[in-house]
Amino acid sequence: MEETERIKISDSSKADHLCVLVHGLWGNPSHLSYLSSTLRETYPDDLHILVATRNSNNFTYDGIDVGGERVAQETEDSIKELEASGHKIKKLSMVGYSLGGLVARYTIGLLYSRGLFDNIEPVNFTTFATPHLGVRTPLTGYQSYVWNALGGRTLSTSGRQLFLIDSFRDTGRPILSVLADPDSIFIKALSHYRNRVLYCNVVNDRSAPYYTTAISKTDPFVDPETVSIKYVKGYEPIVVARDHPAKPIKKEEDSDTYSRFLTSSRSLLSQLPFYAMLTVLVPIGSVVFLINSGVQSFRSQQRIRLHEQGKAGVGLASYRIPLMIESTRSAVQGAIENVNPDQQPNYLDDDTTSSSQLKMSQKRQPDYESDATSEQSGDSDEDSTAELTRVRSYAEFPTLALAPEQFEMIDGLDGVGFRKYPIHIHKVRHSHAAIIFRRAKSDYDEGKTVIKHWLSEEFEIR
């Protein structure tokens, strides 16, 4: 393969498929090295690979929309470069890691609105550990205000968007709510993809917890020792099955309470050195983090001003298009890596849960069904059955105290449909990095199994 600055170009003249990789918050293209190299090794004659570079490092502070506009232009520029070198692109896949998944969802909405999908078939849309519902922690009362209202103000525009405290342009709503609206260009774009798949960590992801990366109203894995986990054959014990992924283990008899107490006590004692270290490092790190956040937020605002003025290398006018499908626009007028708190979520009581479920069941069905989706009705029926089975199995677990907008996001995203694979990383505390083998560390090796599953079972090349 020939390599240019941004694009890994296949030597084969028959390669007509471009796969775009988008990294996460504070990230850079090196975080996707294993993904990129494995794709290249698996499909040397069929695939061109673009690892987006224009929204790297501190530029990720600037917002999902600004990042999406940068990646959209980079994608279109790359397609033109490929065609100029004799490679006609006929298929497009998008892969987003962490915040990159949200940037990718914004990007495809822009590309769809510009008519790119009229000539290029969208094939695979995949996210790894992406906080689709934001990073607002499921808390009630004063805890919700202290963490969720204040936390997002430390990370400029991206932080406010991830904590759902932004008001996106003329919609008056958080951008993540708009991204999941059934009448938006973003959901319309998603519906055109042949495959929509997500991978989500079940434990130890402090950056993007299970409920948000899995687009779920429940979290069966709050205490993994209390559930029986079913794995995908051949990928045990890492890739969890989509149907019946977890079920509660029958409670032990009261006579065994003492042994359980001893076990939990030993577990707590074993972690005391770690927590002792945190009491020293966290205050120092927090001060440094807040100072740096203030500086980066100021620089981010400067970059955003240049971006808005069209002085940052992006033809802004091309991407400032209506966000909603025109026929329904009038009806709808009107964090983050390493910062999530280590605390138990709150749940809704039974009465509140029943009320919210009733309201959701009365919501009108989305009208984004496309010809591309209809053609895949066989696969869609199978996926719907698996999703229904998963939802029924999760009914045994309490509903998290999510915000109303988050419940609506779940409905919107589940309506278009994702195949969801929970991932059980065992070796490290920081599963967020391990899920894609972000760094060449032996402790991250379980991420290789995740990528193997994706390429073998879920990625289509033709």
Image (spheres, rainbow, N blue to C red):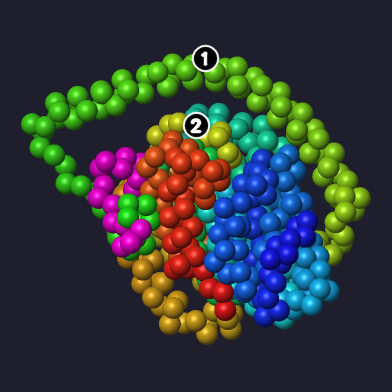
User: Which residue type carries mark 1?
Assistant: Val
- Residue at horizontal 61 percent and vertical 47 percent from the top: 31
- Residue at horizontal 60 percent and vertical 63 percent from the top: 40
Which of the two labelled residues, at mark 2 and mark 1, occupies the earlier sequence position? 1
The range drawn in magenta is 218-235
The image position of residue 290, as x and y in percent, is 67, 25
For this rendering, which residue is in front, 412 or 357?
A: 412
Q: State if disc 1 and disc 2 touch (CB < 8 Å).
A: no
- Residue at horizontal 44 percent and vertical 62 percent from the top: 453
User: Which residue type carries mark 2?
Assistant: Pro
Asked if residue 98 lies in the magenta stretch, the reply is no
Main SS class of the magenta portion in the image: loop
The image position of residue 63, as x and y in percent, is 72, 47
Label 2 or label 1, whichever lies nearer to me, is 1
Q: Which residue is mark 1?
A: 280
Quarter occupied by the C terminus: bottom right
- Asked if 5 appears above or below 227 in the picture, the reply is below
Residue ranking furthest to the left? 255
For this rendering, which residue is in front, 38 or 67?
A: 38
Would you say 83 lies left or right of 218 here?
Answer: right
Label 2 Cα crowd, 10 Å radius (few <14 / some 14-19 / many 20+): few
Asked if residue 222 lies in the magenta stretch, the reply is yes
- Residue at horizontal 72 percent and vertical 46 percent from the top: 56
User: Which image quadrant for residue 203?
Assistant: top left
Q: Which residue is mark 2?
A: 341
